[in-house]
Image (cartoon, coloured by chain):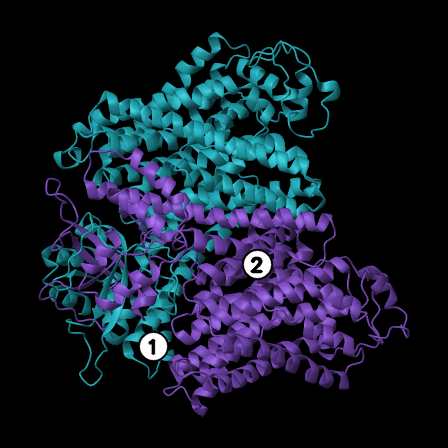
Chain colours: A cyan, B purple
Amino acid sequence: MAYNSQCEHNPGIGRKMKSVCNHKWYEGATAPLQLKKYTQRNNCIEKTYTLGNNSSRSNCAGDGINLFGIGRISHTTCTTFLILAALIHTSNATATDIALDAKATLTHRIDSLNLLVYTFLLTLTVLTIWLFKHHRVSWLHETGLAVIYGLIVGAVIRYAGTSTPLVHLEVDPVGDTKFNQSLPPDTLWMKFPGKLTPNTTDKDPIQNKTYAYAFRGIVYDVEENEIDLKATFDPEIFFNIILPPIIFHAGYSLKKKYFFRNLGAILMFAILGTTLSSFLIGAIMYGCVKLMPEYLSSSFTFLDTLYFGALISPTDPLTILAIFHDLHVDVNLYALVFGESVLNDAVAIVLSGAIQNYGEHYSSTGGFETNAFFKSLSDFFCIFMLSLLIGASMGCFTALLTKFTRVREFPLLESALFVLMSYSTFLIAEASELTGVVAVLFCGICQAHYTYNNLSEDSRTRTKEIFELLNFLAENFIFSYIGVSMFTFPKHHFDAVFIITGFVTAAIGRAVNIYPLSWLLNLNRKPKISSNFQHMLFFAGLRGAMSFALAIRNTASEARQTMLTATSLIVIFTVVIQGGASNFLLNWLKIPVGVDEETEQLNNYRVRSSDAYLQDVDVDVEGAGGLGDAGAPGAMNVKRNEKAFLARIWGNFDTK
Amino acid sequence: MAYNSQCEHNPGIGRKMKSVCNHKWYEGATAPLQLKKYTQRNNCIEKTYTLGNNSSRSNCAGDGINLFGIGRISHTTCTTFLILAALIHTSNATATDIALDAKATLTHRIDSLNLLVYTFLLTLTVLTIWLFKHHRVSWLHETGLAVIYGLIVGAVIRYAGTSTPLVHLEVDPVGDTKFNQSLPPDTLWMKFPGKLTPNTTDKDPIQNKTYAYAFRGIVYDVEENEIDLKATFDPEIFFNIILPPIIFHAGYSLKKKYFFRNLGAILMFAILGTTLSSFLIGAIMYGCVKLMPEYLSSSFTFLDTLYFGALISPTDPLTILAIFHDLHVDVNLYALVFGESVLNDAVAIVLSGAIQNYGEHYSSTGGFETNAFFKSLSDFFCIFMLSLLIGASMGCFTALLTKFTRVREFPLLESALFVLMSYSTFLIAEASELTGVVAVLFCGICQAHYTYNNLSEDSRTRTKEIFELLNFLAENFIFSYIGVSMFTFPKHHFDAVFIITGFVTAAIGRAVNIYPLSWLLNLNRKPKISSNFQHMLFFAGLRGAMSFALAIRNTASEARQTMLTATSLIVIFTVVIQGGASNFLLNWLKIPVGVDEETEQLNNYRVRSSDAYLQDVDVDVEGAGGLGDAGAPGAMNVKRNEKAFLARIWGNFDTK
């Protein structure tokens, strides 16, 4: 048995390593069978390993964007490829070179297959969504569908695939090397086979060659690091590729009139509510983990549970808003849910960053220190406000650029400019160590508010359509991934108590966010938030992409892994069950659906005393003016009884 | 001096390493100054190094797509960040952890900055293009502009920036490890500081921690591998991210009527012409390098020069076609240039792959072997035809899917489906070890031919616009990169003789492609290719993205580096000079411009005896029918005197 013998012949790795063999390599129902197959073809077994650098197909120069480095996937398809590879590569060049080449090629193929799995999942989701829409199925929504398909495919990959462990070797510096740096080196060079005795026949000795190894990170736990990763992506991909278009689209497609009209309530829910909910969840969870078995509770610090609070607090608008949109639900409710969930994503990411900084940089003990607390607090506000500033100013800069140059004569150039400026907002924020996601959100809002009006007709539809499509693909990808990763991501840690408490505190946190704050708001708000609206707001607290992305970002400790598992399950449950039930709840709470925005707007001219939910609604059409070339509001320029204080100040400033 | 002392204290690395220090670390005009600055802040000097895993911002789990791993860039901006970093990170945690964290953060920032440079370049190009178009400047085109801006920024980065060398360490396996594999391990684990003596004070000793290092590739040359990479990308990015949308767009925007009418000539030029040109260039270059100094000529094999022939033969349509498009040049000339350059990209990539396979897998000597030659030949045809098949069948499958489901009721779903199917074509081809780029080309042609007609109005404009924008951004990015990399890519090797011969043979190869084949074609072709058209075809042989991508893919040997330099220069020269001059040449050759496609079409109904260039032109409007729901050609369904034999056969088959 090739795998076992490798373990046994690795005394430098020791007992733990061996337990990995027993524990992981036979993982999955069909694994032993597959293993046997591999062992029979002993000479091509090495090809099943995957490399760290997936891009060096021809071992050529330049390192950098690891295109397909999606981690490791292993399908039964691989075996087919192995046979193919064995057939094709009957060659005369150096054995090691050929094997390495084949290995790199196989890695590239497996990575392509891996991406293909997700493309297939998305295609399937698209087709099923169409069927559902066609047959007017309302009890399951597209994101729920993506999650369910993801779960199925994840289970198949986990139990039908074979595992492809990484082979590792412990090394020491050569001889009497002196190295006077306080950091580990960036690359290691090792001669191979060098002092090792390679597994080849004597008549075909392997030439000594030097290979480079690039720094990857600290090895926390021998067992954890040894597990193969199947169909998993780098967590940073969510923050740098998947979330930005989603968040930008949210800002760009904001219905600004209703957003600004409800700005006070939205800011209250998003900033105060999310912070409140985070700390409450953090506190309850901390109390809970202290009651848990010793081995787990010792892993959690208060900062960990607080981080959990921050990541589980933001709500996800996707599912609920898609339903609202389909049903033409009351626009103010729509604006509240939308505005809140867009902003609380921004709050949560900055808050969790501040909590992390508190633990890593400011606090020496991890307990409460006034100094560190205020440093983190100032971090939170500085990063949030600076990111907002960068986003807003880039948005306004684009508006000026499109207004004062006549680039709109060439729509393609204009659209390219729009995309480039928006993307550079993200990059500028990231390069300044701020939060790119927050910056693109406010950039998107400003682009919608100002730039949009300056664009040519062609660019308007083009930019809208592009970001709509990007958003659709990104959100479905992330929900598929949540499903798949439940099975394939190796760093899950199931703990029933934590998960159940997680569910309960998530609901409590949401309730604390909505009900007391609504009561507070209603004291001084004319279109009061009715209790049915409050229930709907409570119920609309699905957790989604941002929670998951924050949870999977750091899975170094057992505590973090437990949090990831709980978060994944909460996301899956809320998206599938709550998302599916929201239709019924809308009926049950008698929330008006089928409200056309135009009708709504017309209704606003008369005081709708018959309207049980929103009394005394005003129009704030002026907000659409500003820097842009918007069509003159004309007869609609009615402005009376303005109640949203912040919106008024901003509107006044904005329209000057 | 921290850098020097590091070298001197590394006896395991030896003299060569030291020469690197002298040679590279002081590279650039301001480098010594910067170095001094760094040395003064000795405790944060480590932060300037960049890591192999750029994504492990928090050292967390999961490896995979290395988002911003663009290699290394170093701006003067970095110094600002370093100071910032030094100010912010005044902390109590373990020194190494903090330093590693700062290093990872800095890497992420630098990568963001790096991308920002390109975003800025593209923005600048967009704005300048607009100015040029606005003022009707015709002597410089957008791709030429992108190259020139790239050159300027590349020079600035090279001479104004500081270099950030990678620190490497030679290692051996721990003690008495036995390792019975014939391949080097995937990861190395090293204890740090372990046996090393780190450069810290005694009162703050560094804890021993295990770090993982991932396999990167073979170290060919100690000096070359030590150079820092500035603002460079993994070459594979071109094949997996940049080229696919460009090539797909080419296929998707093909004017199929004129393409199919000129199919015979196009196939002749593209397949026969490119192969002929490749072998001729390869042969001449081989003769030439044998006359060169020994150290270089020994590095070249006939396969190398043949590879050069294959990579320099494909022509780039971008610049010339943009000009043709702006001027409404004769549609048949347009179709010839366009069709040829689209197809010869496909031919070149498969041909170069076959040449590489010949060298690596089939031939033991590198010389001519009948067996190996025929294996490579069958490779060439199999890969080309199978890729074509995959592309075409995925295209047709999408057409069927859009025809027989009513997914067009939901344009967003439909567009998503379209994008997903097209992308999966690329992935399927890559996963089957075929050529993804060729597959997407034919997928694009089929999508335009069949699927396009089934799409909803909304999806038609959306898909057109999306791919137009993607194509625009991708092509400008690649030309900027060609400019920047002239200065920043470390593996250039200038050799005047090779470069000059490269220019001459590139022209000869183009001439051999055009003139003899045109003569052959004219024997049996009714709308003869006039000599002025032939001159224009010769002149339209700009080299572009594909040549560059193939050249930069493999820069392991000195021969390959010399080829990269020659290719880059040929691309830059042809794009800037030939592209700029093509306007004048069109005038000088009296080629009809301002031909409206509709006018042209109307003219086709009468035999234009006055037309000196194309006698007896026919209409083949039927080709637009097929699987699609195209509007019935109606009165235009005229079909007489069809001369393009292949087009007729295909048309007959296609319209059944």
Would you say residue A315 is visible in this rendering? no
Q: Chain of mark 1?
A: A
Q: Is residue B384 above or below residue A536?
A: below
Q: Is residue B283 left or right of residue A308?
A: right
Q: Which residue is mark 2?
A: B147
Quadrant of the image containing the N terminus of chain A: bottom left
Observer-nearest of A324 and B18: B18
Circle 1: is it few (<14), some (14-19), or many (20+) Cα within 10 Å? some
Q: Is residue A558 left or right of residue A460?
A: left
Would you say residue A571 is visible in this rendering? yes
Say what secondary structure mark 1 lies in.
Answer: helix
Observer-nearest of B335 and B492: B492
> Where in the figure is residue B287, as x and y percent of width and height?
50, 87
Could you tell me how far apart the alpha carbons at marks 2 and 1 are, in whole angstroms? 44 Å
> Where in the figure is residue A441, as x and y percent of width and height?
49, 33
Say what secondary structure mark 2 lies in.
Answer: helix
Q: Is residue A458 left or right of residue B65?
A: right
Q: Quadrant of residue A158?
A: bottom left
What is the three-letter code of the residue carrying label 1?
Ala
User: Which mark is nearer the camera, 2 or 1?
Assistant: 2
Which disc, if any, is residue A86?
A: 1
User: Count the marks: how many?
Assistant: 2
Task: Please determine if labels 2 and 1 lie on a single subunit.
Answer: no
Quadrant of the image containing the C terminus of chain A: top right
> Where in the figure is residue A299, as x and y percent of width and height?
18, 36
Q: Chain of mark 2?
A: B
Which residue is depicted at the point 33% across and 43% down? B105
What is the three-letter code of the residue carrying label 2?
Val
Which residue is depicted at the point 24% across and 42% down? B43
> Where in the figure is residue B574, as x and y percent of width and height?
62, 68
Circle 2: is it few (<14), some (14-19), or many (20+) Cα within 10 Å? many
Could you tell me if the residues under marks 2 and 1 are in contact, i.e. CB atoms within 8 Å? no
